[in-house]
């Protein structure tokens, strides 16, 4: 309760400061006519009305490029006023045909975003002005360090403010929340920076406003193409989850197994420093790693007693069956390879091919370790679940035998880091997600 009171106190205080900053910018505005200001306000609002959703809570727009162009052409005060207006006068069409705008958006979030946009544009602009005065005209390419400096200030101020509000609202750890909720946006900032410089160059022409408007046709088309791509990826992921659910619906003992394997596989991959694209491939492989069990008879899968030699041979076919099912619809090939070899052991005693060490991809070893841990800690028809500590001991003892040593160490590290606070943190972060990021 105290945290929420503090949150609203800080929000009210920073909102008052924001209003003062906007009033100061309006009174100090120079070299900008009212039509010019209204033009850029309209452009900024259009940009905020056309966001691209990477995932829940991860939204990007080209508003930063507009503010950068304004900083170069009209200065800090105009950029700050346009930043504030863009977050107030937006209209976003939702997938269900409804619209989101200031008048049906939570007031606290509107004020939080207003504070964020205003502070980011104003203080980054002041920093840019100071650096420009210090560097002076020292060559054609001096705009590059200036742009990087401006980008850095906007990014830092923007993300720190949003993280601080989340900290006050939810109690999430500041540093880890910032890293999880902000660092993903860095490529977006870097990619948009040249666009801001290009928009400014267009605007410098005699018919600059017309050229800027004409630029938005290709930009909106590119946004639509990218949105269609993201939608297709989302649909692809939903199909995968549907397949997984269909498999697990056959057996209540393994319900949720693939999702848990996906979770631990992702955590291991992050520990090992995987790139986002490779992490995504590991997650897909984890969700589908047992799809081949569709081709295994129920009498074998759910047998309570010991399996015969022939039945074991049949069970060991499920990775091969899975790859045959998926080979025409799943890419990249690393996904299929991980599914095929997730039961191979580091010492070569696994199946289906008896490969060992470097003959198997690390992705497959990740799936194998995550799969084994969840199997050990879950109830099965033939035994009760092992304790978490017992499973961790087995992971440690089987390093270099069943499990890849680095993969086992990464999983053990993940498991030791887990506690109730971290699960609570993840839930709180979802509830307090930042709605807008430049």
Image: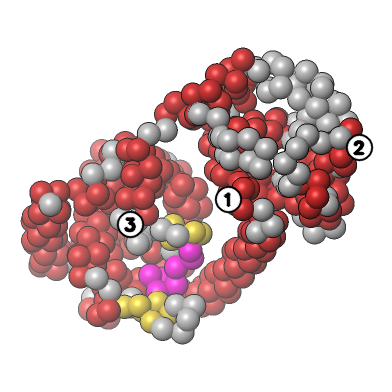
Q: How is the image coloured?
A: secondary structure
Q: For the residue labelled by badge 1, is the local secondary structure a helix, a strand or a loop?
A: loop
Q: Quadrant of residue 398?
A: top right
Q: Quadrant of residue 99?
A: bottom left
Residue found 72% across the figure and 17% down from its top: 401
Q: Position of residue 1 (x, y in %)?
A: 12, 52
For the residue pair 245 and 336, the one nearer the viewer reads as 245
For the residue pair 55 and 237, the one nearer the viewer reads as 237
Residue identified by numbered label 1: 256
Residue 431 is tagged as 3
Task: Give, as a single range, the part of the protein colored magenta.
Answer: 46-53
Residue found 69% across the figure and 33% down from its top: 368
For the residue pair 68 and 340, the one nearer the viewer reads as 340
Residue 310 is tagged as 2
Q: For the residue labelled by badge 2, is the local secondary structure a helix, a strand or a loop?
A: helix
Q: For the residue labelled by badge 3, is the local secondary structure a helix, a strand or a loop?
A: helix
Q: Position of residue 199 (x, y in %)?
A: 45, 64
Callout 2 crowding tier (Cα within 10 Å): few <14, some 14–19, many ≥20? few
CB-based contact (under 8 Å), mark 3 and mark 2: no
| Front disc: 2 or 1 | 2
**Mark 2 or mark 3, which is nearer the start of the sequence?**
2
Horizontal side of residue 337 vs 40, given as left or right: right
Query: How far apart, in angstroms, are the residues tagged by discs 3 and 2?
Result: 51 Å
Q: Position of residue 38 (x, y in %)?
A: 28, 78
Check the image and name the residue furthest to the bottom: 97
Callout 3 crowding tier (Cα within 10 Å): few <14, some 14–19, many ≥20? few
């Amino acid at each position: 309760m105290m945290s929420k009171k503090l949150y609203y106190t800080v929000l009210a205080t920073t909102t008052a400061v924001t209003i003062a900053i906007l009033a100061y910018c309006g009174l100090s505005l120079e070299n900008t006519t009212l039509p010019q200001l209204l033009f850029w306000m309209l452009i900024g609002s259009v940009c905020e009305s056309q966001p691209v959703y990477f995932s829940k809570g991860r939204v990007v727009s080209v508003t930063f490029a507009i503010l950068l162009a304004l900083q170069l052409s009209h200065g800090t005060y105009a950029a700050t006023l346009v930043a504030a207006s863009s977050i107030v006068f937006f209209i976003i069409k939702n997938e269900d045909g409804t619209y989101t705008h200031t008048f049906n958006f939570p007031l606290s979030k509107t004020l939080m975003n207003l504070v964020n946009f205003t502070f980011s544009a104003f203080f980054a602009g002041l920093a840019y002005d100071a650096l420009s005065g210090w560097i002076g005209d020292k060559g054609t390419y001096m705009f590059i360090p200036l742009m990087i400096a401006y980008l850095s200030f906007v990014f830092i101020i923007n993300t720190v403010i949003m993280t601080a509000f989340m900290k006050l609202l939810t109690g999430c750890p500041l540093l880890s929340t910032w890293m999880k909720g902000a660092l993903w946006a860095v490529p977006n900032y870097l990619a948009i920076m040249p666009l801001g410089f290009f928009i400014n160059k267009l605007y410098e022409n005699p018919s600059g406003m017309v050229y800027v408007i004409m630029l938005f046709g290709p930009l909106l088309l590119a946004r639509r193409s990218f949105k269609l791509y993201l939608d297709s990826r989302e649909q692809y992921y939903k199909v995968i989850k549907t397949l997984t659910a269909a498999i697990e619906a056959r057996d209540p003992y393994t319900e949720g197994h693939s999702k848990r394997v996906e979770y631990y596989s992702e955590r291991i991959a992050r520990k090992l420093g995987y790139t986002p694209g490779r992490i995504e491939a590991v997650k897909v492989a984890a969700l589908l790693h047992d799809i081949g069990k569709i081709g295994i008879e129920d009498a074998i899968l759910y047998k309570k007693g010991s399996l015969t030699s022939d039945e074991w041979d049949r069970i060991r076919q499920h990775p091969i069956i899975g790859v045959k099912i998926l080979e025409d619809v799943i890419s990249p090939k690393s996904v299929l390879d991980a599914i095929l070899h997730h039961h191979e052991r580091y010492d070569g005693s696994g199946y289906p091919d008896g490969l060992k060490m470097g003959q198997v991809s690390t992705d497959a070893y990740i799936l194998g370790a995550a799969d084994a841990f969840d199997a050990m800690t879950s109830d099965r028809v033939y035994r009760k679940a092992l304790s978490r500590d017992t499973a961790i001991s087995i992971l440690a003892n089987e390093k270099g035998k069943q499990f890849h040593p680095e993969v086992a160490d990464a999983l053990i590290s993940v498991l030791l880091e887990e506690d109730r606070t971290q699960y609570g943190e993840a839930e709180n972060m979802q509830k307090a997600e930042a709605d807008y990021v430049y």
